[in-house]
């Protein structure tokens, strides 16, 4: 039996990692998991059920009872869900509860592309290929602002502040902070269109798979 092909794609919000991960999964005919959705679902469920997001034990217990259907809940992509996700993601019991879920998903044949913050460092340290996708904060904020302002009136400054706060929280937490794995290739998409970023991502992954 051949081992599952696992690919880890990490990076901060609006770096392009989600689109890249989807396209890489299509190219290699792998399944794709946006792991941010797990943390978003925990935050949204806790908020709906009156569980304080600052309560590590209670949010961790809720994360243990997460159901695949919870990832289909409406509202998971909102800015508020992203902020809440970043708060619950700092709690070790929440991260522990979601670890096996992510690994089980990745290890099912034929393998998977996972995108997140700690895939290459913690979830899949043995992934066959690893990318860390990033871009300057103002460019990421402008991308996110263009998306969000289609549906509602929102100031660019608010989006930039949100991105900076989230970057700081995700990188500063002590459990599985966002960082580039030592063996991950860095892909800076600041000056790239999404098409150029996908092409470059596949070139880097091909190099790692051939090594
Ligand atoms: O990628 P995203 O914006 O959907 O992620 C939402 C939050 O979830 C992010 O701010 C931090 C957290 N997260 C994490 O800690 N680890 C992951 N593997 C994925 C997301």
Image (cartoon, helix red, strand yellow):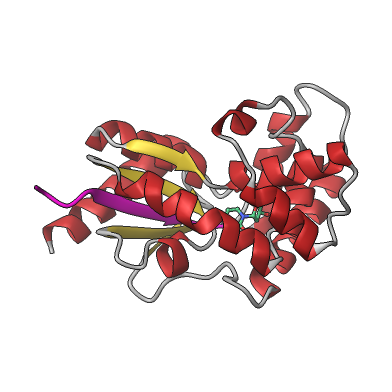
Residue 8 lies within the magenta run: yes
Quick check: can you spot residue 193? no
Considering depth in this image, is 116 or 202 the residue closer to the camera? Answer: 116
Considering depth in this image, is 183 or 143 the residue closer to the camera? Answer: 183
Residue at (69%, 30%) from the top-left corner?
147
Residue 203 lies within the magenta run: no
Q: Give the range drawn in magenta.
A: 1-11
Work out whether 1 lies above or below 145: below
Residue at (62%, 42%) from the top-left corner?
66
Where is residue 86 drawn, in percent x and y?
Answer: 72, 56
Rendered image quadrant of residue 26: top left
Considering depth in this image, is 82 or 52 the residue closer to the camera? Answer: 52
The mark tally for this picture is 0
Residue at (65%, 70%) from the top-left corner?
171
Say which quadrant the C terminus sits in.
bottom left
Q: Residue furthest left?
A: 1
- Residue 20 lies left or right of residue 126; in this view the side is right
Where is residue 10 drawn, in percent x and y?
Answer: 48, 57
Residue at (71%, 54%) from the top-left corner?
61
Rendered image quadrant of residue 186: bottom left
Work out whether 101 lies above or below 153: below
- Residue 156 lies left or right of residue 204; in this view the side is right
């Amino acid at each position: 039996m051949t081992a599952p092909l696992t690919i880890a794609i990490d990076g901060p919000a609006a770096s392009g990692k989600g689109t890249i991960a989807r396209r890489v999964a299509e190219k290699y005919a792998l399944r794709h998991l946006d792991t941010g959705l797990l943390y978003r679902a925990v935050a949204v469920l806790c908020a709906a059920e009156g569980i304080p997001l600052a309560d590590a034990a209670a949010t961790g217990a809720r994360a243990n009872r997460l159901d695949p259907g919870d990832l289909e809940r409406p509202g998971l992509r909102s800015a508020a869900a992203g902020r809440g996700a970043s708060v619950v993601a700092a709690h070790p019991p929440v991260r522990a509860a979601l670890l096996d879920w992510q690994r089980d998903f990745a290890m099912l044949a034929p393998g998977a592309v996972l995108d997140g913050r700690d895939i290459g460092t913690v979830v899949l340290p043995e992934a066959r290929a690893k990318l860390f996708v990033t871009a300057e904060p103002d460019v990421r904020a402008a991308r996110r602002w263009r998306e969000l302002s289609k549906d509602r009136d929102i100031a660019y400054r608010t989006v930039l502040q949100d991105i900076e706060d989230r970057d700081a929280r995700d990188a500063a937490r002590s459990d599985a902070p966002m960082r580039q794995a030592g063996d991950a290739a860095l892909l800076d998409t600041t000056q790239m269109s999404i098409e150029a970023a996908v092409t470059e991502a596949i070139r880097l992954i091909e190099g790692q798979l051939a090594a």
